[in-house]
Image: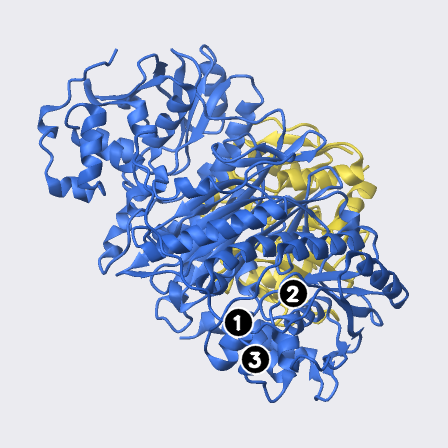
Chain colours: A yellow, B blue
Amino acid sequence: MKASVIVFPGSNCDRDAAIALQSVMGAAPKMVWHGDSELPKSDLILLPGGFSYGDYLRSGAMAAHSPVMHEVVRRAKAGTPVLGICNGFQVLTEAGLLPGILMRNATLRFICKDVLLRVERDDTPFAGHYKQDQVVRIPIAHKDGCYFADPGTLYLLENENRVAFRYCEADGAITEAANPNGSSGNIAGIYNNTGTVLGMMPHPERLIDPAQSGTDGAKIFASLVETLH
Amino acid sequence: MSGTADVAPEATGLSEELIAEHGISPEEYERLLKELGREPSLTELGVFSVMWSEHCSYKSSRVWLKKLPTTGPQVILGPGENAGVVSLGDGQAAVFKMESHNHPSYIEPYQGAATGVGGIMRDVFTMGARPIANMNALRFGSPGHPKTRHLVAGVVSGIGDYGNCMGVPTIGGETNFDPGYNDNILVNAMCVGLVDANRIFKSAAKGVGLPVVYVGSKTGRDGIHGATMASAEFDEDSEEKRPTVQVGDPFTEKLLLEACLELMTKDVIIAIQDMGAAGLTSSSVEMADKGGVGIDLDLDKVPMREEGMTAYEMLLSESQERMLMVLKPGSEPVAQRIFTKWELDFAVIGETTDTGHFVARHNGEVEADIPLPALAHAAPIYERPYEKREALPTIAPDDVQAPPSILSALERLLGSPHLSSRRWIYEQYDHMVMADTVQRPGGDAGVVRVHGTDKGLAVSCDVTPRYCTADPFEGGKQAVAECWRNLTATGAKPLAITDCLNFGNPERPEIMGEFVGAIEGMAEACTILHFPVVSGNVSLYNETNGVAIPPTPAVGGVGLIANIAEMADMSLKADGDVILLLGRETGHLGQSIYMSEMEDRLVGAPPPVDLARERVVGDLARGLIKACTVNSVHDVSDGGLLVAIAEMALAGQRGVDLEAAPEKIPAHAIWFGEDQARYVVTATPDKVDTIVDVAAVYDVPVRVLGTVGGDTMTLSGEAPLPLGMLRAAYEDWLPRFMTQR
């Protein structure tokens, strides 16, 4: 499997993502600078977390217009799996690969903590190592993570079963108390209509090793390797 | 080239008032005239004012700072460069420093705190190290003070936004609320970086005719006279000093970090210095002075953010995210290519000379021409008079009232501003980015894995200001000892400290007495604990209208864990484990949180610190951790023994069943006394005998406190306290305080 991690000015989880990929792939992914218009042949494209362009204008808005993003959009539309984590999710919405937008958290504050997620689907290249309705623990770290979309879009997402993860209680219940940032429908991550583009606010690359106090995040990378190798 | 300068004619004849406004006393001005051999131009006066400011020259503190031990086999580089360096073995080193940004943070909390974080990270990556952990030590006024909430919100948000954008985890810190900080908050930021020990970059510009290169952000009018402002006390008009506060741009700093580290892989940098306090002036003077050369700057080449800035403004601007470098001749294109890739300004703005002078030209005129020694070494050094205060009497436990219920008192203490959870603060800091955080905030120390290895770096920031107020010497000792203890409680071997010495006006003998006492106490503790000082910062004049802050010598320590598999934390691990106390008990309640919270008074001597005991008990605890004999470890500090146990219970989400306190000391003094050199540990029952035996060898008393289990805190003779209620008290105070209208 060949993977590419796109590096924007201000990306700061690019190394973490590369390490997570390497730990399951056994080989290092290609780090692709945002200014490159060429993208190596990739079975997976990963847009990492961070503060591309300092979150100026809007989170992800400027990165979405980087030279490399034209090629990312083209590949995504041709079916190459794309994973956007945190700022990468914001870039994917700004680039039009995923609907909706990530707004400022309801608390108006940055939040860094572990959250519980209910896995809504296990039939995608990203989630094969989870079970549907399983509750997993993965950290969030963001200020702009409140997922918002118009009612029509939300209806479509629900109807097409495109929600990937929801913030939940320990028993899987979807409650307001479990929602850390005010996201519509407790949405923590969504798919495109083919299930090949995933954007999520939580950081699976931060829990891949028991020393980090958990390994629930590793399963996303393991699923990808198994599906795409 | 320079020699005698044509100084702009209109600049001579400076009024006494103008000189005073620059913070230069009449005696200092006399000295300046002698050094320069003539009257200075306005620009030169500005240059002298920042270089001779307390902030840059350490003129009141220098003679005392020499008393601190700064050496040891682990020390690669002590004080004098941008940050200190200690060895981590295997050719790796940790670079770290703590610095204050007190004055700006009070005036403009968000930007003041943000740029404090930015500045300390620059100090670390200037030396070639990648920052891997941040910490901060914050002191705010009383929760009842009308400004406190605004200051907490702004400072925390500023620290978070800067560190989070940089992608460096903020892994802990400490926060106090005390009326003594009502009009002068303290924001002390610490950064730890990782570097190969043979790839450390320094600031001495050795060699003549070398290009001086400016990189990073453009220069604007922000922060002019920041260093001078930070060297004076506040009055009613302090708010008007807002223009002296710098404005931060963490995105640019992130680019600057990556660009500098990329350039450092090429063999082209001779010297590098960040532009912090006193900006271009201080960085160029320091580099030239350390290299034993002169420096010529052509200010017309400086990248500008706004038009029409004078030489005076350019030399004194404290615009952030800027670096000055001296490169090997001919290497400019290599360097420029890297900075262009990162979309940063790059300009050759001068060269090193053999004149021994600092020369700045602007629009064809020589605006400043000053012999370097006059700026770097001729700054006055003061041996200010000092008065030490008399020792306070030790308060007997019986002189402090017992509570109706020990567990109710515990609940009250844990729900107080002193001891309540700081979660509301640390959840605003990304503490997991870089994916190497192995102990998150809320424990004794934050721990990050040394990337790609099994080693861990433990970091802790400590000082107990109320002890320092009562007895600066014991307080200084205690700050160092508590830091050492917090690192030890993770299993780390403490390596070295950085310090941030925050005090009032040193021209007052009683303040100078606090400073001297604290330094002497710290020096003694550093010596006995083999815990030298490798970097630091002094912040004086933290006072308003003649009222000074409590003496606050903050200590930031770094320790090494050889293998993170052998690391300890404070959370209770398993039901049935036995809880034990290591260390001596006297029930010292003077200056305790219990006394403050229950009786609203703080009197008597603080708990004495027996440094030899401290070492023995700490070595015992570390040995037990390494041998995997104990399952959890927590040091006993603010609030005493029962608070320590409660924190362990909350962290592990397990209850405890405690035996009654021994009768020779009043129960409330046993549970809430703040005797030093103590740790609470837990172990499976079969290990207890081993612990008792080993402790006997070290001559450390061990007392069985009870067992782990259930979901309450249970103490014989009292109604059990459900953990849920305790957690509510502990977690509620800060968020409730911050959202009150």
Q: Subunit of mark 2?
A: B
Along the polypeptide, which appears first: circle 1 or circle 3? Answer: 1
- Label 2, label 1: how far apart the Cα atoms are: 20 Å
Where is B454 relative to B650, above or below? above
Identify which amino acid the numbered label 2 is placed on. Answer: Val
Q: Quadrant of residue B69?
A: top right
In depth, the one of B44 and A199 nearer the eye is: B44
Q: Whole-percent x and y of residue B276?
A: 39, 37
Q: Which residue, given by chain and number where applicable, does mark 3 sit on?
A: B412
In which chain is the residue bearing label 1?
A: B
Nearest to viewer (mark 3 / mark 2): 2
Q: Which of marks 2 and 1 is nearer the N terminus?
A: 1
Residue B41, percent from left and from top: 16, 28
Name the residue carrying label 1. B394
- The structure residue drawn at horizontal position 12% and vertical position 43%, both measured from the top left corner, is B17
Q: Crowding at label 2, few (<14), some or many (≥20) Cα neighbours within 10 Å?
A: many
Tell me, yes or no, whether dots 3 and 2 are on the same chain: yes
Q: What residue type is labelled 1?
A: Thr
| Residue B201: % across, % down | 53, 26
Residue B449, percent from left and from top = 69, 44
Say what secondary structure mark 1 lies in: loop
CA distance for labels 3 and 2: 18 Å
- Please name whichever residue, A42 or B452, is drawn nearer the observer in this view of the structure: B452
Q: Residue at x 55, y 26 (%)?
A: B262
Report how far apart the C-alphas of labels 1 and 3 lie in the structure.
25 Å
Asked if residue B233 is positioned above or below residue B701 in the image, the reply reads above
Q: Establish if A98 lies above or below A35.
A: below
Name the disc covering residue B636, or none.
2
Q: In what quadrant of the picture does the N terminus of chain A appear? A: top right
| Left or right: where B427 falls relative to B120 | right
Residue A194 visible in the current orientation: no
The mark closer to the camera, 2 or 1, is 1
